[in-house]
């Protein structure tokens, strides 16, 4: 099944459809580092990782592709898929025939008077599995390989969601750094203004001291934001195995959003998650293993044929033998019981997995609605008010109508709400990523369409190139 995760972010931050390609790419293609392409997207160019220059600005498309082709954790899962291909091949093999050579009374020629007859027997024997054991074994191995495929899809889904979240953190960190730098410049202007007012006798010297303290505090916040951005950049590059980030920055629009579908519509898609599909397939595998144990109660037949050569009589005769175990004591009861209990365990695990994912979806959905409401209030009410208040107080301070503390409080309020807005946007995208991971499909294809929260041109929000 072709999965398509996070296309909402794909539409906002990279060409539509790339993540669909990434998720529909085979494990072998990922392991071998081949280009990702499908007939549906043949008109789009998808450069290989060798064509992506880490020193350039990176989109989410670039980051996801780097991760898919270089993440060692994902590569280990693909190797397990190939390993189980070998198990499936081995399960289809027939038992090897056996060759036996027997020679009796080999010292008869040394005793002419003995009645013992020297003879040699050459016998071939073949075990014949009855009851469909080979077919059941092949079926169990095939389901095991499908389980490995689901494990691979689950890990790929998890890693792409992780990449999108860390990408969001870097993008938000870049915006916070811009705000911190702007706040630092503004604090320096306040120091300059306070110094002029003190020198002209319009303000007491303590006002200049307070402005310098505020500048130092802003500098500490700026350094903290820089450190957080450095950590986020390293975390992002480590996802494709590079401990030293080479890219300049990431590109994206943090303010883009989607119309949130109804909870019922999302809940219906929960069964598309490969974790659910894995748990269902796990039940099938245990049923197949139970069938193997049931068939083992049927005894197999060993058929043999050969020739026996009597040396003294100079005669050769054919021999045939058939052997079959008698199911008197061992009816494979213990293995049957174990397999039956494990199948019941798999059924319980599937129900628990379904319940856990539904619970996570419920919690995430409610958090997403709250985050959407928070963003709306910040964008429509709080930020415009904070911006307007700061502009008025700042001009009034220059004219001596407001005190330094009033101006500083207005500046701090604006900065804090701008940071809060960025964090709310970041949290919103994290929640979108989590829902799309849970339903294993793009949220805007359930219901709704891409929309925009707004622009900072009017209200002091965040806008991205």
Image: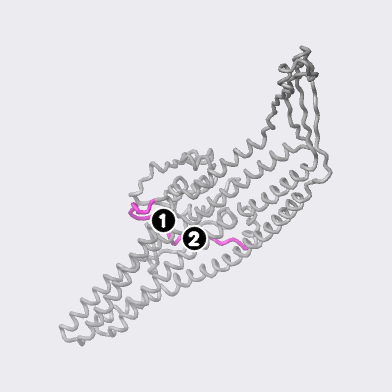
Residue farthest left in this picture: 199
Where is 274 relative to 176, above or below? Answer: above
Whether residue 151 is visible: yes
Relative to the observer, which residue lies in front, 454 or 128?
Answer: 128
Residue that appears at 45% across and 65% down: 425
Residue 183 percent location from the top left of the image: 30, 71
Where is 21 relative to 462, above or below? Answer: above
Residue that appears at 15% across and 84% down: 200
Q: CA distance from mark 1 to mark 2?
A: 23 Å
Residue that appears at 50% across and 59% down: 451
State which mark lies toward you, 1 or 2: 1
- Characterize the local packing of mark 1: few (<14), some (14-19) or many (20 or more) Cα atoms within 10 angstroms: many
Residue that appears at 36% across and 62% down: 229
- Determine whether the residue tagged by mark 2 lies in a helix, strand or loop: strand
Secondary structure predominantly adopted by residues drawn in magenta: loop
User: Quadrant where the C terminus lies?
Assistant: bottom left
Residue farthest top in this picture: 314
Whether residue 174 is visible: no
Residue 142 percent location from the top left of the image: 66, 41
Residue 62 percent location from the top left of the image: 42, 48
Question: Which residues are drawn in magenta?
Answer: 242-263
Residue 37 percent location from the top left of the image: 50, 40
User: Quadrant where the N terminus lies?
Assistant: top right
Check disc 1 and report the residue beneath it: 236
Dot placed on the residue nearer the N-terminal end, 1 or 2: 1
């Amino acid at each position: 099944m072709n999965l398509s995760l996070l296309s909402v972010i794909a539409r906002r931050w990279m060409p539509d459809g790339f993540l669909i390609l990434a998720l529909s790419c085979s494990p072998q293609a990922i392991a071998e580092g081949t280009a990702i392409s499908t007939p549906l997207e043949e008109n789009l160019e998808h450069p290989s990782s060798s064509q992506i220059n880490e020193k350039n600005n990176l989109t989410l498309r670039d980051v996801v592709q780097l991760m898919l082709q270089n993440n060692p954790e994902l590569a280990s899962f693909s190797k397990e898929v190939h390993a189980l291909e070998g198990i499936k091949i081995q399960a289809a093999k027939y038992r090897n025939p056996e060759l036996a050579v027997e020679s009796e009374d080999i010292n008869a020629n040394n005793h002419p008077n003995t009645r013992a007859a020297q003879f040699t027997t050459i016998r071939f024997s073949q075990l014949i599995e009855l009851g469909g054991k080979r077919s059941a074994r092949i079926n169990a191995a095939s389901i095991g390989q499908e389980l490995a495929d689901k494990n691979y899809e689950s890990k790929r889904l998890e890693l792409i969601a992780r990449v999108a979240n860390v990408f969001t953190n870097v993008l938000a960190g870049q915006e916070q750094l811009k705000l911190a730098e702007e706040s630092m410049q503004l604090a320096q202007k306040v120091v300059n203004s306070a110094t002029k007012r003190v020198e002209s006798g319009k303000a007491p010297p303590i006002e200049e001291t307070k402005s310098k303290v505020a500048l130092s505090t802003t500098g500490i916040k700026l350094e903290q934001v820089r450190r957080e951005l450095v950590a986020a950049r390293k975390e992002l590059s480590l996802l494709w195995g590079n401990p030293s980030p080479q890219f300049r920055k990431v590109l994206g629009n943090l303010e883009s959003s989607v119309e949130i579908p109804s909870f019922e519509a999302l809940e219906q898609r929960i069964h598309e998650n490969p974790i659910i599909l894995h748990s269902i397939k796990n039940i099938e595998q245990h049923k197949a293993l139970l069938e193997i144990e049931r068939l083992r109660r049927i005894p197999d037949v060993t058929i043999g044929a050969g020739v026996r050569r009597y040396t003294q009589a100079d005669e050769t005769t054919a021999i045939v033998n058939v052997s079959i175990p008698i199911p008197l004591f061992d009816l494979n009861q213990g293995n049957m019981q174990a397999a039956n209990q494990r199948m019941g365990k798999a059924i319980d695990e599937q129900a628990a997995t379904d319940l856990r994912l539904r619970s996570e979806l419920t919690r995430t959905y409610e958090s997403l609605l709250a985050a959407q409401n928070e963003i709306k209030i910040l964008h429509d009410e709080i930020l415009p008010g904070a911006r307007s208040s700061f502009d008025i107080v700042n001009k009034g301070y220059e004219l001596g109508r407001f005190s330094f503390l009033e101006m500083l409080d207005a500046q701090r309020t604006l900065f804090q709400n701008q940071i809060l807005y960025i964090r709310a946007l970041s949290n919103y995208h994290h929640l979108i990523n989590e829902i799309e991971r849970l339903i294993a499909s793009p949220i805007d294809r359930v219901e709704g369409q891409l929309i925009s929260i707004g622009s900072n041109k009017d209200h002091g929000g965040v806008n991205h190139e």
